[in-house]
Image (tube, grey):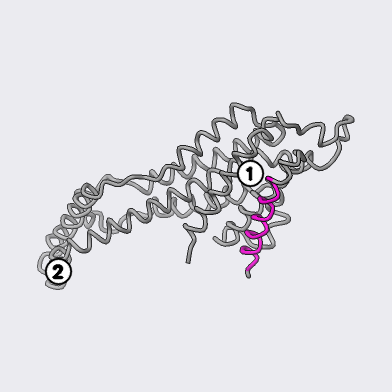
């Protein structure tokens, strides 16, 4: 079993203990175990996807698992930036109907915004507890992301086939006189029905996988941010006053009261994550 797999299994054990501690009214420890569970899940993901190395866990990531995602997005930003800045050696080879459609640039901006949002919230929650409004907004956001996308297969088929046929017709015209291109693109157009059906199938499959991982990353990022500030205070008495952890964390605490919901959300992330990364 790899270190990533062991972290994942330990994270499940931590999560299982959260409900027991909560029902036993050990609220501070329930919150601590929730924080630990999220932290281990994120680190497991980071190692599995080569975003971090096992030796990064203790020093570079420590108890700030959101750094795994900022690293992931930074890596994606660098890759997208390189693609966006690479000029086409033969611009005219791009089919006319595809020109001006810069998906790479759009993805780059979205990824930059995601990374900046995490960094800004990390600063915000470094010394501040999440408000009840923040928590409720987070929960509503997760509920929306639970809904899997619905695809109009007929429209997808029509759009994909139109793009596929036009692209190959363009290649035949652009490489006029090249019999190999004419034969290859001609055969692709002739067999376009089956090819496009497979493209639609793959598009739907990838769309569902992206949606499921979108839910996982949303929950893990947000719970990382709003629980990390409590990593010490849930375990140690205050050095500034006479408060013990059990004094600070009670049934009506903003985070504590939502722990049952957080548990269900985390259980769903486990299911989704396994489905996304199933062998």
Quarter of the view holding residue 205? bottom left
Categorize mark 2 by other alpha carbons within 10 Å: few (<14), some (14-19), many (20+): few
Which residue lies at the image location 62% right of the left edge and 42% below the top edge? 223
Q: Is 75 situated above or below 241?
A: below
Of the pair 277 and 253, the residue shown nearer to us: 253
- The verdict on residue 16 being magenta is yes
Cα separation between marks 2 and 1: 52 Å
Categorize mark 1 by other alpha carbons within 10 Å: few (<14), some (14-19), many (20+): many
Left or right placement of residue 221 versus residue 191 in this view: right
Of the pair 274 and 158, the residue shown nearer to us: 274
Left or right placement of residue 29 versus residue 34 in this view: right
Q: Position of residue 86 (x, y in %)?
A: 37, 55
Left or right placement of residue 227 versus residue 242 in this view: left
Task: Please give the residue where the numbered disc 2 appears in the rendered image.
Answer: 187
Number of dots carrying numbers = 2
Of the pair 210 and 187, the residue shown nearer to us: 210
Label 2 sits on a secondary structure element that is helix
Chief secondary structure of the magenta portion: helix
Q: Are marks 2 and 1 in contact (CB under 8 Å)?
A: no
- The verdict on residue 197 being magenta is no
Q: Earlier in the sequence, mark 2 or mark 1?
A: 2
Residue 105: give its label: none
Quarter of the view holding residue 173? bottom left
Q: Give the residues in magenta.
A: 2-19
Q: Position of residue 50 (x, y in %)?
A: 57, 62
Residue 224: give its label: 1
Q: Position of residue 10 (x, y in %)?
A: 68, 58
Which residue lies at the image location 69% right of the left edge and 52% below the top edge? 14
Of the pair 2 and 30, the residue shown nearer to us: 30
Label 1 sits on a secondary structure element that is helix
Q: Quadrant of the N terminus?
A: bottom right
């Amino acid at each position: 079993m790899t270190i990533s797999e062991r972290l994942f299994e330990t994270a499940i054990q931590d999560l299982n203990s959260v409900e027991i501690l909560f029902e036993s009214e050990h609220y501070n420890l329930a919150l601590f175990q929730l924080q630990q569970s999220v932290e281990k899940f994120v680190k497991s993901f980071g190692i599995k996807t080569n975003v971090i190395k096992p030796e990064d866990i203790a020093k570079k990531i420590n108890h700030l698992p959101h750094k795994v995602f900022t690293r992931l997005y930074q890596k994606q930003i660098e890759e997208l930036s390189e693609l966006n800045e690479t000029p086409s050696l033969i611009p005219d080879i791009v089919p006319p109907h595809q020109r001006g459609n810069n998906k790479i640039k759009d993805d780059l901006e979205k990824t930059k915004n995601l990374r900046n949002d995490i960094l800004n919230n990390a600063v915000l929650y470094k010394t501040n507890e999440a408000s009840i409004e923040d928590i409720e907004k987070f929960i509503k956001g997760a509920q929306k992301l639970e809904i899997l996308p619905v695809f109009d297969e007929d429209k997808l088929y029509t759009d994909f086939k139109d793009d596929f046929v036009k692209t190959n017709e363009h290649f035949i015209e652009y490489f006029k006189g090249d019999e190999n291109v004419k034969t290859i693109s001609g055969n692709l157009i002739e067999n376009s029905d089956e090819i496009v059906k497979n493209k639609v199938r793959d598009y739907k499959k990838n769309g569902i996988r992206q949606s499921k991982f979108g839910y996982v990353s949303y929950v893990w990022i947000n719970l990382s941010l709003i629980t990390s500030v409590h990593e010490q205070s849930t375990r140690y008495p205050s050095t500034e006053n006479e408060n013990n952890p059990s004094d600070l964390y009670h049934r009506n605490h903003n985070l504590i009261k939502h722990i049952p919901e957080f548990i269900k959300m985390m259980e769903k992330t486990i299911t989704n994550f396994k489905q996304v990364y199933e062998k």
